[in-house]
Image (cartoon, rainbow, N blue to C red):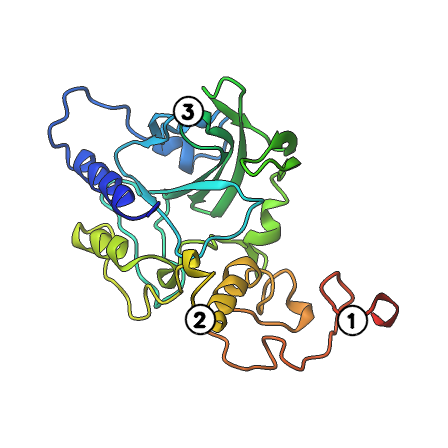
């Protein structure tokens, strides 16, 4: 289980580091000023989110997590972390997005390959500053020793573990808003209580990192069961995670009239017997009949 026992072990180690137990060499603390300041740090290492950047070993206060149904990203493995400043905690808001204090950060590294062959491609960070969330992309160097700010995005030619050659796209800073925007504001979209395991949430609550485990948590199906599990909840989870950040009221594709959020129960709103009202690529029907 990729995000099971191993992830919880790493999380426990992080909690231990946070509590200062058995520390022989004082690790470098996370740079809070880099998160909350107005500047855009040029290198990922300036944040000090990791004690070992190549292995993605988190610093104290940086907690790994995984999603039960993750967003598909060209088959990339994604290593997810959250950072909370000392003395703060996450707040539950029903089964939806966890609420982060100012000074928090969400870190996501995209990688291909396994073991010694694993190659880190990019790391995206969301920084919660006093005037809102800021999204920044960082591109890893060939030596895998540093990731540098890539405001303009970029392209990387690579071959996936499945043998597929592709031109991988790192989004530019503005493109981050394509998925992370609602009502004109940049927001996180991943760490929702319904898409996090009960084990991880329980550990967070037990150690005071989360105020409580909310009702409705851990309700999305585990995507690893997609070949054998019930189709309807798996399909709804896929649409919620991969599509609903745009297809919901206030989202970037709200003019489509689709609302693909997990909590939406109106069949017409999720597209059943619904006629297209926009002419995008997902409008459906033969090309000559789209309008």
Q: Position of residue 97 (x, y in %)?
A: 40, 60
Q: Earlier in the sequence, mark 2 or mark 3?
A: 3
Work out whether residue 147 or residue 132 is closer to the camera in this orientation and state it.
147
Identify the secondary structure beneath mark 2.
loop
Residue 190 — which label? Answer: none
Q: Nearer the viewer, mark 1 or mark 3?
A: 3
Quote the CA–CA distance across marks 2 and 3: 36 Å
Dot 2 or dot 1, earlier in sequence? 2
Q: Position of residue 118 (x, y in %)?
A: 46, 29
Q: Quadrant of the C terminus?
A: bottom right
- List x then y, in percent, for residue 72: 54, 51
Residue farthest to the right, as pictured? 288
Label 2 neighbourhood size at 10 Å, few (<14), some (14-19), many (20+)? few
Numbered label attached to residue 116: 3
Q: Residues within 10 Å of mark 1 (few under 14, many from 20)?
A: few
Q: Nearer the viewer, mark 2 or mark 1?
A: 2
Front residue of this view, candidates 210 and 142 = 142
User: Mark 1 to mark 3: distance in Å?
Assistant: 46 Å
Classify residue 259 as left or right of residue 218: right
Query: Is 92 above or below relative to 269?
Result: above
Please name the residue that numbered disc 2 is placed on. 230
Label 1 element class = loop
Residue 285, numbered circle: 1
Residue 273's x, y, as percent?
67, 82
């Amino acid at each position: 289980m990729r995000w099971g026992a191993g992830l919880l072990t790493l999380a426990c180690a992080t909690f231990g580091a946070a509590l200062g137990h058995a520390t022989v060499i004082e690790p470098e603390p996370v740079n809070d000023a880099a998160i909350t300041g107005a500047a855009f740090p040029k290198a990922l290492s300036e944040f000090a989110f990791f004690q070992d950047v190549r292995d993605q070993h988190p610093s104290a206060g940086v907690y790994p997590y995984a999603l039960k149904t993750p967003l598909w990203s060209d088959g990339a493995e994604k290593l997810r972390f959250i950072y909370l400043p000392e003395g703060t905690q996450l707040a539950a808001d029903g089964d939806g997005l966890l609420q982060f204090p100012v000074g928090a950060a969400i870190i996501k590294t995209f990688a291909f390959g396994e073991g010694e062959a694993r190659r880190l491609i990019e790391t995206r960070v969301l920084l919660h500053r006093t005037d809102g969330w800021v999204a920044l992309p960082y591109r890893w160097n060939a030596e895998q020793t540093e990731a540098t700010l890539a405001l303009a995005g970029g392209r990387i030619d690579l071959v996936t573990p499945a043998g597929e050659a592709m031109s991988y796209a790192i989004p530019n800073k503005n493109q981050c808003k394509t998925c992370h925007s609602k009502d004109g504001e940049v927001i996180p979209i991943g760490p929702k209580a319904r898409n996090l395991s009960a084990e991880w949430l329980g550990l967070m609550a037990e150690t005071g990192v989360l105020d409580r485990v909310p009702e409705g948590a851990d309700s999305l199906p585990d995507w690893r069961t997609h070949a054998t599990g019930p189709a309807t909840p798996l399909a709804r989870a896929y649409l919620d995670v991969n599509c609903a950040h745009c297809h919901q009221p206030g989202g970037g594709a709200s003019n489509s009239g689709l609302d693909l959020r997990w909590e939406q129960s109106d069949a017409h709103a999720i597209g059943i017997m619904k006629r297209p009202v926009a002419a995008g690529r997902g409008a459906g029907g033969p090309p000559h009949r789209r309008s």
